[in-house]
Amino acid sequence: MRAPGGSSEVTAATASSVLLKAALRYVRAGWPVFPCQPDAKVPFPHSRGFKDATVDQDVITSWWTRCPLANIGLATGGPGPDVVDFDVKAGAPGRATYERLRDAGLLVGCHATVTTPSGGFHLYYLGTEQGNGSLSRHGVDFRGRGGYVLAPPSTVDGKPYVLASRRSRFDGQARTVNFGAIRRHLNPPTTAPRGVRPDRNSDHSALVAWVAGRTEGGRNSSLHWAACRAIETGADDQVLTELVDAATSAGLPRSEAERTVASAQRGSRR
């Protein structure tokens, strides 16, 4: 029997039920979620985005009752998952990068693979304290602490995120992933860390890799030193962005990393 108002209402009602049930499944697994705008990647205006993410089932039910077609934003980084995002749109080399990292043994232990509306895919790992990172020229991003992804069955432009494969997080096979190791494999240092002093207009990948390997307690000062050396030797804005990404992957908050690089830039103009 057709419901009053036609089949579109049936479809909307079904979609809203599926979204709420999915959101509740994520929070029962201990993954904090929050609502994003329907059929879009962005949070609602005046919300705090991933900072609103929660595992409170009553709050989740209330959110999706008010907006049944809201997409599911999944806060990444422990207790949520870490996610490696491979991009293939507009010719991005995410597929080739995936194969390169897979063959190097750096992607072992993912417990879910999700295909994205743009044709790329997300690999889910156990969450850690790692921050976000990006290697855009390789078509790969990392979503950790301070980030989020849309989770199935969310849609963008009418196309869904789809769970392609899954294993239990608790079967002993699921593992963490090391984005710093991924970065170093894709952008290997050209010199030993102790010799990181690039000449003018030289390759700055060694500086980027060195910053990615810094540990807590020295990350900010290391980033500032590296940014100053990069600026002195003719680095462009892309190198400075990569330094911010490297510091973020090492655990420095992105806002702090950006302020540190901006400080180095101001010092270079004095």
Image: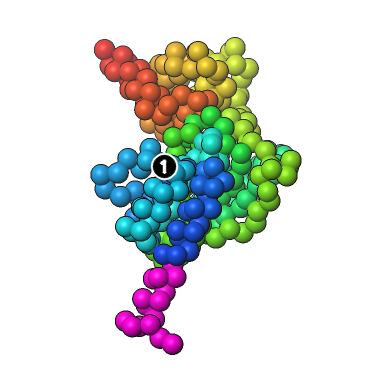
Q: Report the residue marked by disc 1.
A: 53
Please determine whether, in this image, residue 156 is positioned above or below residue 133: below
Q: What amino acid is found at the position of numbered circle 1 in the picture? A: Ala
Q: Position of residue 108 (x, y in %)?
A: 70, 42
Residue 134: percent from the left, percent from the top?
Answer: 49, 38
Q: What residue lies at 69% left-to-right and 43% top-to-bottom? A: 170
> Does the stretch in magenta take in 24?
no
Residue at figure coordinates x 57%, y 32% from the top left: 128
Q: Residue furthest bottom?
A: 1
Secondary structure that dominates the magenta span = helix
Quarter of the image with the N terminus is: bottom left
Foreground pick, 237 / 5: 5
> Where is residue 15, by image quadrant?
bottom left
Q: Does residue 270 show up? A: yes
Whether 54 is drawn above or below 64: the answer is above
Local packing at callout 1 (Cα closer than 10 Å; few below 14, some 14-19, many 20+) is many
In this orientation, does residue 240 appear? no
Considering depth in this image, is 190 or 78 the residue closer to the camera? Answer: 78
> Looking at the picture, how far across and down is residue 186, in whole percent?
60, 36
Q: Residue at x 57, y 22 (%)?
A: 213
Q: What residue range appears in magenta?
A: 1-15
Placement of 97 over or under 188, stated as above or below: below
Which residue shows up at 49% across the image and 53% down it?
Answer: 24
Q: Relative to 63, is 203 on the left or the right?
A: right
The colour scheme is rainbow
Label 1: which secondary element: loop
Q: Nearer the viewer, residue 78 or 178?
A: 78
- Estimate the x, y position of residue 150 in percent, counting from the top left: 46, 51
Vertical order, 252 against 157 (above or below): above
In-image side of 200 versus 127 (left or right): left
In the image, 197 versus 132, the foreground residue is 132
* Residue 10, quarter of picture: bottom left
